[in-house]
Image (cartoon, rainbow, N blue to C red):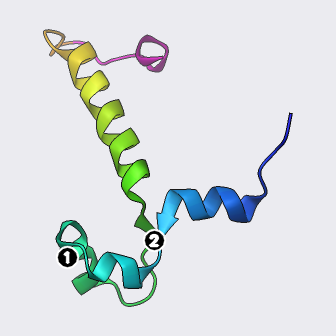
Amino acid sequence: MIKLSCDVCRASLVMDAASASNDQSYHLLFLKNNGGLVILSEGTVRVIRAAEWAIRQASAGRRSQPIKPLEVV
C-alpha cells in the first residue's frame, strides 16, 4: 500500500488564498484573512457538509438526548 506524504495530503485538503480570491464562496474568508486562516478545498467542504447532513439526520427526533459519537459512525 502506498502512503501519501504529508505535503500531498495537505494540498488535497486546502487551497491557496489566490485561488480562493476568485471564488465567491470564499469571499468572507478572503476578506477576513490576515494571512493566518487555512482555506479548505472544495472537496473538503463537500465532505464536511455531507457529515453535517448525516449528523442532522441521525439527530432528527432526538432533541432530548445527545448523539453518541459511535452512533454517527
Where on the picture, by quarter, is residue 68?
Answer: top left
Residue 70 placement (x, y as % from top left):
49, 14
Compared with residue 52, is residue 36 higher up or lower down, i.e. above or below? below
Label 2 amino acid? Val
N-term-proximal mark, 2 vs 1:
1
Compared with residue 69, is residue 6 higher up or lower down, i.e. above or below? below
Query: Residue placed at 25% from the left, 29% from the top?
Result: 53
Q: In the image, which disc is placed on residue 62?
A: none
Label 1 amino acid? His
Q: Nearer the viewer, residue 44 or 19?
A: 19
Q: Nearer the viewer, mark 2 or mark 1?
A: 1
Q: Of helix, strand and loop, which one carries label 2?
A: loop
As drawn, is 65 to the left or to the right of 67? Answer: left
Q: Which residue is mark 2?
A: 38
User: Does residue 28 show up magenta in the picture?
Assistant: no
Q: Which residue is mark 1?
A: 27
Where on the picture, by quarter, is residue 38?
Answer: bottom left
Query: Residue placed at 69% from the left, 60% from the top?
Result: 8
* Extent of the magenta region: 65-73
Q: Residue furthest right?
A: 1
Residue 63 placement (x, y as % from top left):
15, 16
Q: Of helix, strand and loop, which one carries label 1?
A: helix
Query: Residue placed at 39% from the left, 85% from the top?
Result: 18
As drawn, is 23 to the left or to the right of 37? Answer: left
